[in-house]
Amino acid sequence: MKIARYRIGSGPVRLGRVDGARVTEISGVAGIGASLKEILPRLGELRDQIADAAGDTHALSEVTLLAPVDEPQKYLGIGMNYKEHAEEARQAGIPIPTSQLWFNKQVSCIVGPHADVEKPIVSDALDYEIELAVVIGRRCRHVGAADARSVIAGYMVANDVSVRDWLQKRSPTFTLGKSFDTHGPLGPWLTTDDEVPNPLDLGMRLTVNGEVRQDFRTNDMIYDIYEQIAYLSTVMTLMPGDILATGTPAGIGAPTGSFLRVGDVVRAEIEGLGAIENTIVAEPAV
């Protein structure tokens, strides 16, 4: 299933099942409200009701898609987790880590799949990173890699927008450079795990104004998504709705100085999951 959060005009937030180019409302079915996070632990038992729901239906072009997961508790990202990207990062002056390198991306940065992304007033080093986003479906701790798939609700497309000078020079951690407002576009919807035969081998592509910048498969990861969940859940309890950005492939702008400018259109697409597309705009003056 593909489940989206959306609005029609200025109306209330709704949940819907995406079928092709249309979305059918599922809010109100079997106690389902407008929160995707609330139903994640029950997706299995709700599957038939969601599949059979016959609420109001609209063309996707008629609605505003929102970030699929409402109010996630955590948004965590792993750095330099693709082989070729780790090498290009090293060439940009970032040492290659010897273990999983995780950072916190503040949830206040999250925006919808077609929302504008602001170029900060304080930086000219705005970069892009296409990533497979994993959404946790149930509360879990100390999950072994062999069992990790059982705690995954589904997947989204993420652009881990990064402000490079704040990421590498202005802060001793990655958090600030990863957490500017609007720098977490996600979507376009949640594709449930059962619809993705092998998340470890998906094609992913990012373009800027139609020019291909990143074009890889998720099989280039150094630590796969199951190893990531095992590592994180050793440290902390993962909760329904938590988002894991699982790394970006080679092709980021930093090594060549090909940073984003106002007016650029960035499209990130992952096989079977859909695409997000965001326009770069100037941050409003304070």
Image (cartoon, rainbow, N blue to C red):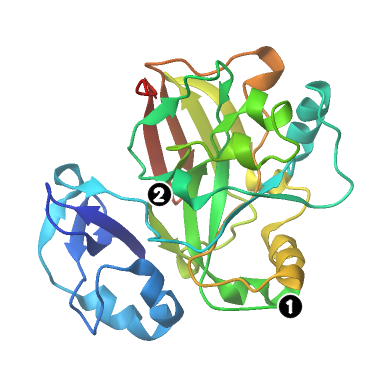
Residue 259's x, y, as percent? Answer: 56, 17
Choose the circle earlier in sequence order: 1 or 2: 1
Pick out the residue farthest to the front: 286
How would you rate the neighbour count of disc 2 (Cα within 10 Å): few for under 14, some for 14-19, many for 20 or more?
many
Question: Which of the pair 46/93 is nearer the observer?
Answer: 93
Quadrant in which the C terminus appears: top left
How would you rate the neighbour count of disc 1 (Cα within 10 Å): few for under 14, some for 14-19, many for 20 or more?
some
Secondary structure at numbered mark 2? strand
The amino acid marked with disc number 2 is Gly
Q: Residue at x 26, y 53 (%)?
A: 20
Q: Considering only vertical position in the picture, is 211 above or below 214?
A: above
Image side of residue 110 versus residue 35, left or right: right
Q: Residue at x 38, y 61 (%)?
A: 70
Q: Quadrant of residue 195?
A: bottom left
Image side of residue 53 versus residue 174, left or right: left
Q: Is residue 275 visible?
A: yes
Q: Are dots 1 and 2 in contact, CB under 8 Å?
A: no
Q: Is residue 271 visible?
A: no
Residue placed under numbered mark 2 in the picture: 187
Residue 209's x, y, as percent? Answer: 42, 18
Image side of residue 107 versus residue 220, left or right: left
Q: Considering only vertical position in the picture, is 245 above or below 167?
A: below
The amino acid marked with disc number 1 is His
Residue placed under numbered mark 1 in the picture: 142
